[in-house]
Image (tube, rainbow, N blue to C red):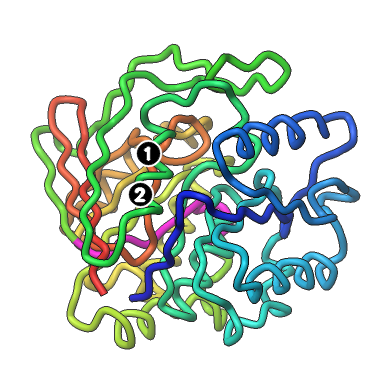
């Protein structure tokens, strides 16, 4: 595995390989850029974050062109999108994976398509964490603030993150708190079957709504990644559901299983979901229980990951040890080569 470095005076590039920001919300981009500069970062803004038309920031070739330029620019230490979106998958065929420089890419939601594809194709670690506009507050909650500590950890370093105390139930961009998020609800990590869960393995994952579409493509070769970069080591999946109904999530997980994504799996960590749409009494918990039984691995859910912030910064490719018990959770990530 390859782990990028991030100096304290890092240069951060902002590009929108998925959705850009409409003019009515440009103030979010400006506020985030100003806040990052106050923290000592140099911010390089691309063109695509400022535009949005028909569910994307720009045509796929234009989005990919700007992304490729930043990926190949040795002056850039970190690439972050303004936020997620819907159609990042259109960009993958235009990305020059062989020319990607050693640098962090961080984001979540639709960006997890790019994160997972880069790690699987190149063996370079990527960071599932906050998007650019979510870093604009004068304060940063303790969980979100860990992103800097995690990205600055060097080879063979270990970083510890713990579950948050409270999480945000709904988004309210027009009325942000000092730390952007409104953290009002008690965080409770849950274990299928109850009790204590322990799992260890190499992290892979993202938003299940979108990464499922990598199955069967050249960008979703999980088995090849294991053989080339982490031979003999188990995987530890983290997944989160943005919009899927219970049965659609179940279909997606079965497809991933049939494609071999859960071979040598040591456990699964599911993030909090904003949707709970049962079908004929079939619930999200039923899905988790069936998956735990079929795979014979621990399953933890309602963890700090995804669309209900705050969230941990989880590194695709890092070795992780996860413990969940009595509503609390701890994730220790080690940057093993």
Separation of residues labelled 1 and 2 (CA atoms): 6 Å
Q: Does any portion of residue 160 appear in the rendered image?
A: yes
Which one is in front, 127 or 199? 127
Residue at horizontal 52%, vertical 72%? 118
Q: In x, y percent, where is residue 100?
A: 58, 78
- Per the image, is 65 magenta? no
Quarter of the image where the C terminus is located:
bottom left
- Magenta residues, as a range? 201-212
Instruction: Tell me the residue that label 1 is attached to.
Output: 146
Query: Image quarter for residue 59?
Result: bottom right
Q: How crowded is mark 2: few (under 14 residues within 10 Å), some or many (20 or more)?
A: many
Q: What element carries label 2?
A: helix
On screen, residue 295 above or below 171: below
Nearer to us in this view, 179 or 152: 152
Helix, strand or loop at disc 1?
helix
Counting from the top left corner in percent of width and height, residue 130 is at 52, 42
The N terminus lies in quadrant? bottom left
> Do the numbered discs 1 and 2 sit on residues whose CB atoms are within 8 Å?
yes
Q: Position of residue 238 (x, y in %)?
A: 36, 52
């Amino acid at each position: 595995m390859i782990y990028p470095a991030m100096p304290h005076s890092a240069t951060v590039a902002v590009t929108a390989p998925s959705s850009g920001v409409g003019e009515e919300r440009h103030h979010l981009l400006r506020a985030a850029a100003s806040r990052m500069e106050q923290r000592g970062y140099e911010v390089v803004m691309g063109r695509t974050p400022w535009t949005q038309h028909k569910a994307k920031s720009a045509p796929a070739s234009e989005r990919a062109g700007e992304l490729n330029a930043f990926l190949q620019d040795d002056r850039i230490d970190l690439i972050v999108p303004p936020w997620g979106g819907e159609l990042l998958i259109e960009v993958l065929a235009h990305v020059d994976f062989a020319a990607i420089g050693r640098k962090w890419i961080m984001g979540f939601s639709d960006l997890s398509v790019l994160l997972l594809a880069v790690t699987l194709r190149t063996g370079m670690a990527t960071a599932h964490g906050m998007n650019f506009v979510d870093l604009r507050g004068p304060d940063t909650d303790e969980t979100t603030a860990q992103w800097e500590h995690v990205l600055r950890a060097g080879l063979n370093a270990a970083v510890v993150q713990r579950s948050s105390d409270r999480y945000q139930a709904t988004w309210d961009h027009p009325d942000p708190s000092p730390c952007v998020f409104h953290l009002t609800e008690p965080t409770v990590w849950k274990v299928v079957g109850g009790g204590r869960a322990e799992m260890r393995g190499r992290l892979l994952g993202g938003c299940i709504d979108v990464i499922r579409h990598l199955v069967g493509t050249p960008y979703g070769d999980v088995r090849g990644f294991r053989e080339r970069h982490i031979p003999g080591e188990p995987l530890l999946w983290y997944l989160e559901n943005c919009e899927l109904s219970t049965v659609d999530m179940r279909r997606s997980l079965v497809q991933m299983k049939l494609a071999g994504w859960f071979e040598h799996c040591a456990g699964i960590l599911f993030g909090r979901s904003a949707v709970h749409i049962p079908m004929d009494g079939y619930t999200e918990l039923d899905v988790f229980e069936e998956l735990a039984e079929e795979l014979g691995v621990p399953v933890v859910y309602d963890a700090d990951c995804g669309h209900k912030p705050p969230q941990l910064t989880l590194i695709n490719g890092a070795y992780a040890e996860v413990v969940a018990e009595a509503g609390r959770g701890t994730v220790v990530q080690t940057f093993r080569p």
